[in-house]
Amino acid sequence: MRKLVVLAVALLAILLCSVRVLAMAKQQLRFDENGEFRILQVADMHYANGKTTACLDVLPQQVSSCTDLNTSDFIRRMIKAEKPHLIVFTGDNIFGFDATDAAKSMDAAFAPAVSSNIPWAAVLGNHDQESTLSRKGVMKYIVGMKNTLAHLNPPEMQDIDGYGNYNLEVHGVKDSGLTNKSVLNLYFLDSGDYSKVPSIPGYDWIKPSQQLWFQRTSAKLKRAYKSTPEAQKAAAPGLVYFHIPLPEYASFDSSNFTGVKQEGISSATVNSGFFATMVESGDVKAVFTGHDHINDFCGELTGIHLCYAGGFGYHAYGRAGWSRRARMVVASLEKTDKGVWGAVKSIKTWKRLDDEHLTAIDAQVLFSKSPAGSRRKKHISGSTE
């Protein structure tokens, strides 16, 4: 009897896994009929216990009524305003020290994304595992949630460091020549929490095993993109998402970035070489992180834009009177000579503030097939703070 129970449980697990695989297959990411793909980045929600969790660093008149629910409301407003095709949460999704039940906190934190029926993805920050689940447990829970495209780790690499290293492909417009090819590649990595090396203080970093996976994945995607049918000459652009910024983020000052820098760069104290790895890959156009809540700048270094989203959550440190914010990224396709949708023509970004009008600021071009386009910057309507 016991063997039958064990077998039944195993079969149920296989069935549930198969159902999820089929559901994810139906959620194949692709550009819409207007040749656009829209990504909403949410950084540092720091969600805890909902309406009983107070806000940090808000104006005096906001203190009495502000809770985690303000964070949830901001996500809903962003989804309604920007209509993203994918929502990406870049770590510190929950604030473990104050979350009494990690699973319940994640259910509440991701609820606006889940209820929207928009595909979403997530990586871990340095605080997600500080509640009632281990780091692996947190990522496994996220992977099991509705509408998520997140993965625990790539199946082809059993010994990779961290949890939440995976990639997503964004295919061309349906029924176009590139409908079966990924024209935009998204990479997600676990940047860890804190150094495990006693002689190295501070935050963690992206390890050699992760970089090897990235290199292999990038190479595989480039081969597929350049092969028949519809062989392309250049690699499809790639975007990379993780939590802790790289040391190279310290390369910028107000003369060569868009946005603001209001605190130091809290990267690892060692340089793992991942920036050089991305440069060598040749396909990465931009990196998006969180972690430093009151930095929201985006600057270009050696052909790659390094971007912060700015703090999103109300139970996260910030600056009173400095609006919480989110980053949008929109990739657009070109029209071929035959009038059909082709490869990616441009990738643009801007931020929206959680104010009365969801003010949009700091629009800039991250990638363009026009050399001049990659250097153009402009502001769109609204405050520049």
Image: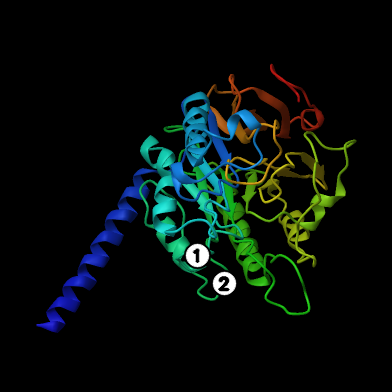
As drawn, the label of residue 125 is none
Q: Which residue corresponds to mark 2?
A: 160
Q: Residue at x 39, y 35 (%)?
A: 116
In the picture shown, does residue 112 fall above or below 127?
A: above
Nearest the viewer among 239 and 189 is 189
In the picture shown, does residue 147 fall above or below 332?
A: below
Q: Quadrant of residue 101?
A: bottom left
As drawn, the label of residue 154 is 1
Looking at the figure, which quarter contains the C terminus? top right
Q: Quadrant of residue 17?
A: bottom left
Residue 368 showing in the rendered view: no
Looking at the figure, which quarter contains the N terminus? bottom left
Q: Residue at x 32, y 54 (%)?
A: 20
Q: Residue at x 31, y 51 (%)?
A: 22
In the picture shown, does residue 137 fall above or below 361?
A: below
x, y (%) of residue 49?
45, 49
> Outermost residue toward the left?
1
Nearest the viewer among 168 and 134 is 134
- Which type of secondary structure does the marked residue at label 1 adopt? loop
Residue type at numbered disc 1 = Pro
* Circle 2/circle 1 CB separation < 8 Å: yes
Which of pointers 2 and 1 lies earlier in the amino acid sequence?
1
> Outermost residue toward the right?
255
Residue 101 showing in the rendered view: yes
x, y (%) of residue 238?
64, 47
Q: CA distance from mark 2 to mark 1?
A: 8 Å
x, y (%) of residue 64?
54, 34
